[in-house]
Image (tube, coloured by chain):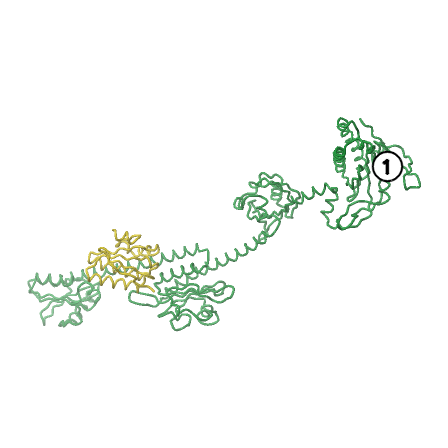
Chain colours: A green, B yellow
Amino acid sequence: MVSKIISDYNNKYPDLDIDCSFHKQKELLKSIGGAKYLLEGRQIPYYEESLTFLKDKLDANKSLDSENLYFINEINDTINVPIFCNDEIIGIAFGRKSNIKPNIINSVGIQLSRFITKTFFTKKIKSLESRANIKDLEFESIVQLTNMLSFCDNLSNETLEYILIHLVSLYAASKGMFILRDSNTNIFEVRATFEIREEDMPRRMLTDNKGLLAELKNTKKTFLVESDKFNLVKFVEHNSICSPIYFRGNLLGCIILADKESRKGFIHFSDLDANLFDSLTKEISLTINNLKLIDDLQSTNNLIDNIMTSIEAGIIKFTEFGEIEYVNKKAIEIIGIERDLIQNQHYGIIFADNELFLEVVSNYELAESDNQAQVVKNVPFKSFNGTIHTLDTTITPVYDKDKDRSGYILSFDDISDMQKVKTTFKKYVSGNIVDEILDDNSKSNLGGTLSDACVLFADIRGFTSFSEKTSASELVSILNKYFTEMIDIVYEYNGTLDKIIGDELMVLFGVPNNTEHDCQNAVDCAIAMFKRLDEFNDILEKSHNHKLMIGVGIHYGEVVAGNIGSDKQMNYTVIGDNVNQAARFCSNASPNEIVISEDVYKNISHQNLFSESILINVKGKDNAIPVRKFTHFSI
Amino acid sequence: MSKIINTEEQNKYVVVKTEGYFNKDLGELVISVVEEKVQENKFHFILDLEQSKIVNSIGASILIEVIEILQDKDGTLSLCHMAPIIEKTFSIMGLTKYCNTFATLDEALAQ
């Protein structure tokens, strides 16, 4: 373009012999076809003199008024005008002096100045645009890296490689290395590399006792490293930038980027690069630390989960607002619904169909002042799959680090199987004894203790003759129905069924647990047995034309109560003279009659139901014994 | 290491396949191939970046130079198989405004 402008003028004004030359902006001029006008290599007479004159005139005028800015060289008879680029004289346009066309040379200078300045700014804008694009790219890469770090959920080699590649690209580096410390061994390991040859990989064990890692540990700063300074960075051909990854003063690793590229070749990383890299590695440090904390938390959670899974009790942790925060495996089994459907739900929704269970939790939740553990036993619970459970529950508060209540934990034991065993056991042994043994394991040991007890015997009268007239199967059936009715009454009056001896019942009151009403209970039980027997007889009379009648003997006194038998089989029973005496009273009792001792009589309230004291002789006693009798009159 | 794995002519296009980091070295390899082919009056190029998953700003700048060379000759540069990160980089650098991009080489050849 420069040559076109010159040649256009020369074509138009051939007598002026217009030319130009430049001493500055050589690259710019080369790019716009002005290479041949560069001063170097040309012989331009009086160029320096003209340039000095023009500069002086420019300085004196402080103006770019091109009309006055010219130099007439009288020696060679030329007019010289400056050519500007961005307010600076970069060359001179000159031509033969002419009186006819004095301003033509000026026009050449002005046109060349405008063209070159415009080209200069166009290129500058393009260059700035390119730099802005690169900055934009850097910014975008930082945003992308930061986003990636914020979503990063593991510290796999792939993740670290991804981070490294981003950094290499961002800094236009040629190579990179990511080193992290193994938390178990404390030895540093190369976890990711980019464009590093196998032979350049570190061979020695990496520790932070010496070398680059020691320097990073001590300075805790990003710094520029020349290739030959540390053995670890022998892959660096020009220079590198190293940044530490650390947490609470401990070096966790480092990132090394090497050999920054430019269009013209390798260049050094700048201080600006170091500052930005330092910020980014701090962000990466934070992410790595967070991931390590998450790993630790996960390990702790796994440990807790393992412990909770191994516990045979169901565990539910509620938040302060009653939402289910955690359930262990056993709890899920008992509740009978998937974990995902329970977690984060309010207990009121999950346990809506279990009124008593709901009550246990809600009562505790509402009792804000009650921070003690609360135990509620035998709570019925219907699971989502319809199974009925019996649970022993314990609910305890949970406190946060400020000792504020942050929720509560409900633990529950499924005692359904125990209940079945208990129920079955109670068919063989009196319920009181079963409870006593289950509550206190030592109660299942052989041995006995002296206790005051009221002993009741009830025997069917005339049973032998009845049995002769009745088939064995019918007899067993009738006896079973009779005992079912009688034993129900025994339990109603808190009696302990000791044993059934043929058609005779032996019942204890006051052992294993004594009360103030043992004699009263025994007498009331006997009277109730008569009444129930009346009802039973109504049916029996219709079916077999027969009535059962019983006689009852009751005595109160000291007995030896305990487990009698062997380790393999034992019975809880009572023995002693007073037991025998109760049996003798029973033998003495007529049908529909209760015979009680004076000791029993003294301990009952409705004494008027009994006769005056009478003396009876019983087997094994030399002297007659005073007793009182009650006679039941069947309706 | 970064390199050109194949250069071949298909239809009116010169297809250049690269491998590895698209940096200064690889960019310069590409520009030298383009300059050589331009001498042979080949002005339409397809750059297949399937094996190049990462690029830096210097690599992108060199591609801008390639586009300038081809524009002077009324030629074209098409890009295919660009990884998302490369596509984003080229977009930010303003490069994709001056070249066609395609998902596959077949699509680029069929343009």
Left-right relation of A192 to A443: left
Which chain is home to disc 1? A
Measuring from the top left, give residue A19's x and y in whole percent: 12, 66
Residue at the image point whose x is 75% and y is 44% from the top: A433
In which quadrant of the rendered view does residue A15 lie? bottom left
Which quadrant is the C terminus of chain A positioned in?
A: top right
Residue A337 appears at what percent x and percent y?
55, 43
Residue A263 horizontal side relative to residue A232, left or right: left
Q: Position of residue B80 (x, y in %)?
A: 30, 55
Out of A564 and B92, give the one closest to the viewer: A564
Three-letter amino acid code at the position of disc 1: Ser
Q: Locate the N terminus of chain A and report the quarter of the image it occupies.
A: bottom left
Badge 1, how many Cα within 10 Å: few under 14, some, many 20+?
Answer: some
Query: What is the x, y in percent for residue A63?
Result: 19, 63
Q: Nearer the viewer, residue A479 or A107?
A: A479
A194 lies left or right of A33 = right
Q: Nearer the viewer, residue B88 or A274?
A: B88
Helix, strand or loop under label 1: helix
Quickly name the residue at label 1: A587
